[in-house]
Image: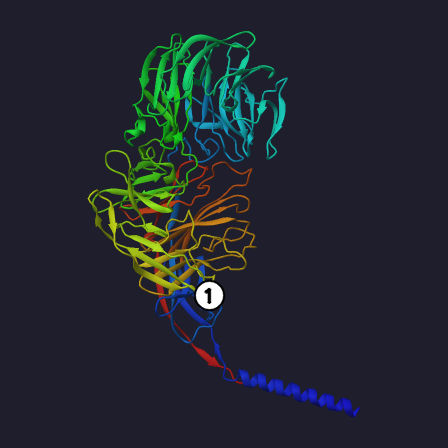
């Protein structure tokens, strides 16, 4: 018992010593009291607030995007910064930012559809590839459209609204009709070695079932019950007799034309033809075929024997440069051929004799100038052939795809322009003239914008005026970096940038008032650079934790004797230490081209567009004062990569929801900052969200759209795919307009109008953080 008594005494003494040690350690320790402050709201508004030190650095964001009603309100700061560290006693400032900014999606530029939203909008990844007309129904196809449909129709008296024809899973590229069925030829959307033909009935648009058709299931499980000529070679031409019973399918790569029974789908025979391409059947069921004869592409006419054999009619057109498409008028008198190369024209011939009747379009097309007119066509350019299609209406008027300008043109039988269908298809480059906001660029297309008119497809609020793409060589044709940016400099000449893939830098081009683009031998410095409105260049260095993030500036010094810009040597603009991966370190990206935006307060932006991984849930947007070496503020704090839930409405950066490619770019105009989030694969869909931040680092608002589910609405309000090329401009009354690209959803350049910017108000409230000492 004595032994246990000693053990108990020892334990008591040990515990007493431990308690004495704890009390001694805590005695005199400073403890922080919470800091309460009041602020006033004149009218109900969205608010954000933060704690700043006396040098204007944002230490902690208290809240973002919270609506407060009119009146006086109280709030509390717990004395810590954004990373939970206690701040020393002293004087601080609370800034409360309030606003009633309004964000309105106005629609798109470059799309003539009657509606901006909904299933009737003309939109697709690719342009219109083929058209066939039965009565007042015009059927058309658009090629690859991911897992979406690619077969559509419109009524010729209402061309600005479309209807979907068939199911998903096939990229249809050619079509032909006999008036009873429409025959479609294409490839599995995700296996371009599987080609086929199938048909739909004109009366109800349902799939035609052939006695000799076979089932084809595409890679993603879409089923076609009655496909024909299922092969592993590209289909290059398609035609069908109207009264006869033959269907013709050309395979250029294997020099064959396959002839099938159009009613049963049974195979009749193969005919050897050298490199067969486009085909059509005239009103007498004779076949016109473009093919290679003695090393040159010609168009030749054949009659069809009862066994399906081709018989020469000795009518041949051999004065063509690069024939692409062919069609015969309803009266059987005129044959039209679209001729590319140095021609770029529509050529008409007598269908019986082959004699020339007339030629339509300026010879050379856009090789001569970039000016867009209805009397010019863009069938090919320096980089290759684009292709086209021709289709007649019963009244003899005809539709021609002008592919380089993304428009299907309609002309009368006497060749007078009537109207058009236009949509832009997939585009990843968009910019607005830095010193002239009326100049909008989508890839190489230039639009003139009239801000005095409400945005509509047919009221002159936008006009396609130039196409600069004809002379661009392949090595300057990066689809993410086409004419970003465009700026008119003090010599009154306009310049743009194209990315040189062979030299890995941005090359300067000039867009002259008269004539085509001039490609200079001047390039921006190597590295990550941005051309600014004043002609200067800003450059950001690539860094990692432990190294400083540096910005440099090159001043525009003048121009050489041919008008090329000359820049100074680099000057250090700002430098900030990168402490951890939580800082907004710029990540090199081919889509984030606004790498050194500067606000009117001299705040330089750093934006990390990549999703946070491996627990590095840091900030994605930061601001540094020019000439300084510290973060003035950091915002857009990341969610966890494991986050699953709604898209953050308070300006956070969503790294969760299974997103792969998250942010897009950051823009600055005045004191306003916008950063984008395109969110590819976010919840197996996409996102088009834009966050508005003031240049004190506080959140203003958010606008945009969440992508639909696979079975969701078509062309929903404000939605765009991979919207990462953007520009923001200001009109003469203080409103802002944010423009951005679209991959498919609306097939045009989106425009958001941002108003009520004068409601942005900053309240500054002095506060003092005190300490107390707790004794035991």
User: Looking at the picture, how far across and down is residue 304, in whole percent?
Assistant: 51, 9
Quick one: quadrant of the N terminus?
bottom right
Identify whether 113 is placed above or below 559. above
Relative to 560, 164 lies left or right: right
The reply to whether residue 401 is visible in this rendering is yes
Identify whether 770 is placed above or below 728. below
Relative to 724, 309 lies left or right: right
Identify whether 361 is placed above or below 88. above
User: Looking at the picture, how far across and down is residue 143, in whole percent?
Assistant: 49, 30
Q: Dot 1, how many residues are within 10 Å of its Cα: few (below 14), some (14-19), or many (20+)?
A: some
Is 673 in front, or is 270? 270
Q: Residue furthest front?
A: 294
Relative to 494, 179 lies left or right: right
Is 328 in front, or is 59? 328
Secondary structure of the residue carrying numbered label 1? loop
Is 72 in front, or is 561? 561
User: Looking at the picture, how far across and down is residue 134, in whole percent?
Assistant: 47, 17
Is 587 in front, or is 519? 519
Residue at 36%, 44% (x, y): give it.
499
The reply to whether residue 393 is visible in this rendering is no
| Residue located beneath label 1 in the image | 82
User: Looking at the picture, how far across and down is residue 749, in whole percent?
Assistant: 38, 39
Number of residue marks: 1
Q: Quadrant of residue 158?
A: top left
Residue at 45%, 55% (x, y): give it.
651
Q: Which residue lies furthest to the bottom in this view?
A: 2
């Amino acid at each position: 018992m004595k032994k246990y008594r000693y053990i108990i005494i020892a334990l008591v003494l040990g515990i007493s010593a431990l308690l004495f040690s704890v009390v001694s350690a805590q005695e005199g320790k400073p403890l922080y009291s919470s800091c309460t402050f009041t602020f006033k709201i004149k009218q109900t508004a969205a608010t954000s607030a933060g704690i700043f030190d006396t040098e204007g650095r944002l230490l902690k964001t208290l809240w973002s995007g919270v609506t407060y009603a009119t009146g006086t309100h109280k709030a509390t700061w717990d004395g810590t910064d954004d990373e939970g560290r206690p701040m020393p006693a002293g004087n601080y400032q609370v800034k409360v930012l309030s606003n009633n900014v309004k964000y309105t999606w106005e629609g798109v530029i470059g799309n003539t559809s009657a509606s901006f939203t909904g299933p009737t909008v003309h939109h697709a990844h690719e342009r219109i590839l083929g058209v066939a007309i039965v009565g007042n129904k015009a059927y058309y196809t658009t090629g690859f459209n991911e897992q979406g449909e690619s077969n559509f129709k419109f009524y010729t008296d209402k061309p600005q609204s479309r209807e979907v024809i068939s199911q998903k899973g096939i990229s249809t590229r050619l079509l032909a009709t006999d008036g009873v069925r429409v025959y479609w030829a294409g490839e599995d959307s995700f296996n371009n070695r599987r080609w086929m033909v199938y048909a739909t009935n004109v009366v109800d648009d349902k799939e035609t079932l052939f006695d000799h058709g076979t089932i084809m299931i595409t890679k993603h499980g879409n089923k076609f019950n009655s496909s024909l000529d299922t092969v592993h070679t590209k289909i290059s031409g398609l035609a069908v007799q109207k009264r006869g019973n033959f269907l013709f399918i050309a395979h250029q790569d294997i020099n064959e034309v396959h002839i099938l029974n159009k009613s049963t789908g049974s195979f009749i025979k193969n005919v050897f033809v050298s490199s067969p391409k486009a085909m059509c059947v005239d009103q007498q069921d004779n076949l016109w075929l473009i093919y290679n004869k003695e090393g040159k592409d010609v168009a030749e006419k054949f009659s069809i024997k009862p066994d399906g054999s081709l018989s020469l009619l000795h009518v041949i057109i051999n004065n063509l440069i690069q024939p692409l498409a062919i069609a015969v008028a309803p009266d059987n008198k005129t044959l039209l051929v679209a001729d590319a190369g140095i021609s770029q024209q529509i050529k008409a011939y007598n269908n019986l004799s082959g004699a020339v009747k007339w030629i339509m379009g300026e010879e050379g097309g856009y090789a001569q100038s970039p000016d867009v007119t209805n009397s010019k066509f863009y069938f090919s350019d320096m980089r290759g052939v684009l292709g086209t299609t021709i289709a007649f209406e019963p009244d003899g008027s005809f539709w021609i795809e002008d592919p380089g300008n993304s428009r299907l043109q309609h002309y009368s039988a006497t060749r007078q322009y009537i109207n058009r269908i236009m949509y832009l298809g997939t585009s990843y480059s968009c910019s607005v003239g830095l010193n002239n906001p009326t100049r909008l660029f989508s890839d190489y297309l230039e639009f003139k914008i009239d801000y005095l008119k409400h945005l509509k497809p047919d009221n002159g609020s936008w006009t396609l005026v130039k196409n600069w793409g004809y002379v661009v060589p392949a090595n300057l044709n990066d689809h993410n970096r086409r004419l970003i940016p465009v700026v008119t400099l003090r010599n009154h000449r306009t310049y743009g940038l194209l990315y040189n893939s062979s030299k890995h830098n941005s090359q300067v081009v000039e867009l002259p008032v008269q004539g085509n683009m001039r490609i200079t031998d001047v390039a921006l410095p190597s590295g990550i650079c941005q051309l600014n409105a004043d002609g200067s260049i800003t450059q950001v260095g690539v860094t990692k934790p432990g190294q400083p993030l540096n910005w440099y500036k090159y001043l525009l010094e003048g121009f050489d004797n041919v008008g090329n810009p000359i820049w100074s040597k680099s000057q250090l603009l700002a430098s900030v230490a990168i402490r951890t991966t939580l800082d907004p370190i710029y990540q090199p990206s081919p889509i984030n081209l606004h790498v050194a935006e500067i606000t009117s307060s001299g705040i330089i932006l750093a934006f990390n567009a990549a999703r946070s991984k491996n627990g590095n849930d840091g900030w994605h947007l930061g601001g540094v004062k020019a000439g300084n070496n510290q973060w003035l503020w950091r915002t857009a704090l990341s969610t966890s990569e494991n986050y699953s839930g709604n898209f953050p409405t308070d300006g956070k950066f969503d790294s969760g929801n299974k997103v792969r490619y998250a942010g897009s770019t950051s823009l600055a105009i005045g004191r306003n900052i916008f950063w984008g989030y395109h969110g590819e694969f976010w919840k197996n869909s996409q996102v088009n969200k834009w966050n508005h931040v003031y240049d004190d680092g506080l959140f203003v608002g958010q606008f945009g759209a969440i992508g639909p589910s696979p079975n969701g609405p078509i062309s929903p309000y404000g939605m765009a795919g991979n919207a990462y090329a953007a520009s923001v401009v200001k009109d003469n009354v203080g409103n802002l307009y944010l423009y951005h690209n679209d991959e498919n959803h609306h097939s045009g350049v989106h425009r958001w109008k941002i108003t009520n910017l004068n409601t942005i108000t900053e309240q500054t409230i002095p506060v003092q953080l005190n300490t107390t000492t707790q004794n035991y």
